[in-house]
Image (tube, coloured by chain):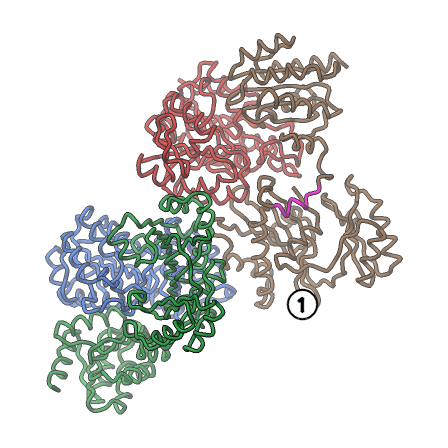
Chain colours: A blue, B red, C brown, D green
Amino acid sequence: MSIILDKDTKIIVQGITGREGSFHADLMLKYGANVVGGVTPGKSDQKVHGLPVFDTVKEAAEATDTDASILFVPPRFSRDAILEAVDAGLEIVVTVAEGIPFHDMVYCREYANKNGCTLIGPNTPGIISPGKSKLGFMADSIYKEGSVGMISRSATLSYEAVNNLTTSGIGQSTVVGIGGDPVQGVTFKDLLPMFEEDPETEVVVMIGEIGGTDEEEAALYVKKHMKTPVIAFIAGEAAPEGKRMGHAGAIVSPGGEGSADYKKEKLEEAGIEVARKLTDIPALCKKYID
Amino acid sequence: MSIILDKDTKIIVQGITGREGSFHADLMLKYGANVVGGVTPGKSDQKVHGLPVFDTVKEAAEATDTDASILFVPPRFSRDAILEAVDAGLEIVVTVAEGIPFHDMVYCREYANKNGCTLIGPNTPGIISPGKSKLGFMADSIYKEGSVGMISRSATLSYEAVNNLTTSGIGQSTVVGIGGDPVQGVTFKDLLPMFEEDPETEVVVMIGEIGGTDEEEAALYVKKHMKTPVIAFIAGEAAPEGKRMGHAGAIVSPGGEGSADYKKEKLEEAGIEVARKLTDIPALCKKYID
Amino acid sequence: MKIYEYQAKEVFAENGIETPSGQLALSVKEAVEKAEELDYKVALKSQVHVGGRGKAGGIKFASTKEEVEKMAEDLFNMKIKGEEVNRLLIEEQQEIKEEYYLGLTLNRSKKTDTLIFSRSGGMDIEEVAAETPEKVVKVDIDPVLGLQNFHLTPVAKAFDFDKEMSKKVAPIVKKLYEIYKNSDCLLVEINPLALLTDGSVKALDGKLEMDDNARYRQPKLLTMWDEEKEEEMELIGRQAGFVVIKLSGNVSIISNGAGLAISTLDSLQRHGINAANILDLSGGATSEKVQKAVDVVLQDSDVKSILFNIFGGITRCDEIAAGVSASLKKVPADISIVCRLQGTNREEGIKILKEAGLEAASDLEEVVEKVVKTLKGGE
Amino acid sequence: MKIYEYQAKEVFAENGIETPSGQLALSVKEAVEKAEELDYKVALKSQVHVGGRGKAGGIKFASTKEEVEKMAEDLFNMKIKGEEVNRLLIEEQQEIKEEYYLGLTLNRSKKTDTLIFSRSGGMDIEEVAAETPEKVVKVDIDPVLGLQNFHLTPVAKAFDFDKEMSKKVAPIVKKLYEIYKNSDCLLVEINPLALLTDGSVKALDGKLEMDDNARYRQPKLLTMWDEEKEEEMELIGRQAGFVVIKLSGNVSIISNGAGLAISTLDSLQRHGINAANILDLSGGATSEKVQKAVDVVLQDSDVKSILFNIFGGITRCDEIAAGVSASLKKVPADISIVCRLQGTNREEGIKILKEAGLEAASDLEEVVEKVVKTLKGGE
């Protein structure tokens, strides 16, 4: 088991004829993902890696019975492409682009919600269920099938954390990058219940960072509803107030709202162990793994 | 049992300080409906029939834990009032107004759908679960508790059909007026599955009329999914082509699309008995009632 | 309500959709004057609400002053499907390369908006859809989402548009969608939308069908509404505050709901009788309103009998009966009145009618049979 | 990005929100000229990006030419929280009856838009919310639905507006919402929105915070952006295509992701070391890009050491190493370079570095300890 993504999930790639789209479609196929086609308007006469290319998501969905889409589409065209995928009834949409305008995401997030679509991203490497399927561009060699569920706002920190786990012999059920933007699709508290219901996941690792209130809300959820143990890490304790730390969402408000210390306090209040360093995570996980 | 509405359903009346709103709030209360309050912006200092009046649906919903709202609001303010009720998270919204602009309803219908709200109307007398609750303005004395479920596009024809049933000793589980507009909230095929799941409903009567394709789609649904027997009546066999017959939705297209004969044919193909006259309905129902 | 081609084109032009230059002419003299400005190379297009104008010879092409004069005269003397021609649109002739159809209306099954295109422009879209469905492309638009760029991909594909052509057509579709929404239209059509030899894309003919319910917020479009073209009885009814439907028989059906009225019509027909008109009192009618309704239907010279079919909910039978009773003296002797009262305050109503010398049936079939007897007896 | 008050007021005025008449002055002379048109009864408002301008004495009220001259001179010589005053807004004085706060921004928890009002206008809204939360009303707006009339009921209620006042304020809220959406703002504020003694309602001060990601579609607002006010290193970085964050220490962190960079910063701090800056290479950086990044951070005179922290996914360690190697000759001898390479093509990268005489750490803690040693050793 895994969450959201497994080996049967039928995937299309929006922007498949582009450089990145084509490159990562190939890597996903090689990982064993069930990629069934791609979409680029006006290019339905082409094939990419033997996959059919459609002009619209709707045509692709009708022809291939698609479940999920990953978008390799530039930020300025992302709103239209996300809305197209949601409108076509896809259940999972991953958008990797960095720099999508704020109001575009505010709209897309809510439109996806209302249509019952699991929107992941933007500014994310995607999602991977090791050994099963990959809907993203992460370097898949560092992942290993196992029982740690992971949710991360930062791509690089998830690589770092996964690498620490794998080299310690600990595998992962599903690793979801939720992205570092202030407004994104699913966030910690949307994914926690899925991990809670997944019998394979024995412990969940949340990699958070400064800014926003997502970790605090996740803490509340964990306290109320989770039986599966949860471990957390928060980056940015050294970040000064009022500076956006690279990720658009990573900013401590003047007054200290959204600071690492505040988040850690809330997480610990909810009974969540907070790792001081990323290298501490494997040892914390081991306590809960058979 | 009944569908949508039962004696516990908590009801608010939007427009409760108006003449009609106040009058029917009283009649609903007298019928035993669980009316818990009303809404009229700027009138929260008032009480109507002992009920609290709120300025916004959200305030009412938070104070009374409302499930449902009925709108006695003029057509030109209906869009805003429907959207307010849906946005506040109500599960059932009934709008009785006649003459709501077309595009307002196209929008409201879809917005309600996306928010999981059961929108009933416009141009409807509402919904009644005899002996339990009433969310509408129908003359309740003709209804009787029992096991016939009814869905009607026409108010007067539902009165007629109900009266025939009641005087024949046959009661009703729930009677829903879906309204005679070309675009409305729920329609036949949205309600049929609810009646199918209602153990109390032994037979469903559909009162349709010329225009649109709702009856045809209901027929398809019945053929595929319904075990509960369904009886139908279609008004308008004498209507000439191209004339809107009073209801905005009741029009036979040039070429015969939406005609009574066509609808009857589709219903009969789906195994649905079509009553020639309204007075035939009780006898047809009796066959299926213990 | 429908508006004329020249009015639709005004709406198009105001919203940035290009149309041929043209002017309205109400007489032959005016037609010649307007044509002069265009050097007499003009199309003369009769302005009527009925369809099939082209086939009926309602559009002519002139190139000299004499031709304009003669053709305008012919057209003003024409009737198209019974409709008189009182207005001509005098329009610059166009050199057409391709003709398309572009429309927006309701998908009645899904109840969403739907964008319709066809490469067979200038033809009746329903015929095209029936005969060559592959030539018609429909794209549903979630009304909450509204028109987005991705909705336009199937248009470009269906038309084999290159990028240049897509760039010309996309803004037209967006503007038409705005008209559809902002002007409260049930239907908007550009047919044909033409690619001209000079590379421009213009709306050569157009149709807008307005939502009656939205009249109050469309003051400008309301001025375009041609009351003359409305069925007289329906106009009289509307002015008195009722929905009246004019039909071809001789019974007037007055009812407190559309469904009941239609059903009464069905019953009459089964007995071989047609209605002259239907008048819907709606819910909660007072005695005064009933009298007003009787005044309305008496203006229909086809009426030989008035049938009241009332099932009172909000409507009270006693109010109806009082109205009928008060109207009696106005009803000529050769027009019979039959009543059916059911529902709220039925007993009180029956009593009032009895005092006025009228009986009341209790069910629909009974009252219909009474009308049949009256009318057949009277033959 | 933030824009000045006078620019925000330009945006307000263009969108139909009334503002006091006023003009910008860049010198004392100009200030006097502009004030003359208003008969010298003016407010002189220093234009700065930092908050708390009023308390710092950055706003003055004059009524004679001499006062204007003196006050303008004072203001142009002022620094407000370290920011020089280079621009004054010379504005007609207003007779204020009531002051309100009106703003729109993101509800970060629900991630919907939220409309914020307060009766305590002219004050810092966060302070008001913290001290007297009952004076602040927030209304969430479903971004798919957009602002509707019903959202305005709570405004009227909170302000005890009568119908007349509601009618004045409702269009202002709607226009502000349109600015928020159409101008791609992260935050819009009118503070105070004032009811004047003449009954009009005007925006007396305003703030817009623009979305950097939407620059490409806001050409007009882009012209309002004052690059001078940007941190120099951040501007240099942006012009070279990087996100650079200027900090107060002496290590430059170059990383292939924001999270990794922040985490490196945390580690350094635990060893008592601060960063001079952070530079994010993003994913897939080439050797050339790495060289460009080194060029950028070398312009920061605070930098004593450059720390590369790379966990390659799309990013290839060999490309990074090649870039570092090619940059070495440009790096002054007193600036040390330490590297950590992990992930894609790590071995190839280590080899390239070794050839250039550099070692590569394999984990974060290791590289941080190396920096610590280098810096402390150099003291």
Residue D28 included in the magenta stretch of the image: no
Q: Nearer the viewer, residue B256 or A116?
A: A116
Q: Image height check: is B221 above or below A33?
A: above
- Residue at 47 percent across and 58 percent down: it is D18
Q: Residues within 10 Å of mark 1 (few under 14, many from 20)?
A: few
Residue C32 rendering spot, x and y as whole percentages = 84, 56
Q: Which residue is mark 1?
A: C199
Residue D272 rendering spot, x and y as whole percentages = 13, 75
Is residue C37 visible to the viewer in this orientation of the structure?
Answer: yes
**Residue D278's image quarter?**
bottom left
Residue C277 lies left or right of residue B102; in this view the side is right
Q: Nearer the viewer, residue C170 or D277?
A: D277
Residue A290 lies left or right of residue A112; in this view the side is left
Residue C253 rendering spot, x and y as whole percentages = 65, 23
Residue B64 lies left or right of residue B251; in this view the side is left
Residue B57 rendering spot, x and y as whole percentages = 38, 39
Magenta span: C219-226
In the picture, the quarter occupied by the C terminus of chain A is bottom left
Q: Image height check: is B79 above or below B263?
A: below
Q: Nearer the viewer, residue A24 or D156?
A: D156
Q: Image height check: is C77 above or below A140?
A: above
Say what amino acid the circle numbered 1 marks. Gly
Q: Nearer the viewer, residue C356 or B127?
A: C356
Is residue A36 visible to the viewer in this orientation of the structure?
Answer: no
Chain on which label 1 sits: C
Residue C223 included in the magenta stretch of the image: yes
Q: Image height check: is D19 above or below D1?
A: above
For label 1, the SS is: loop
Q: How many marks?
A: 1
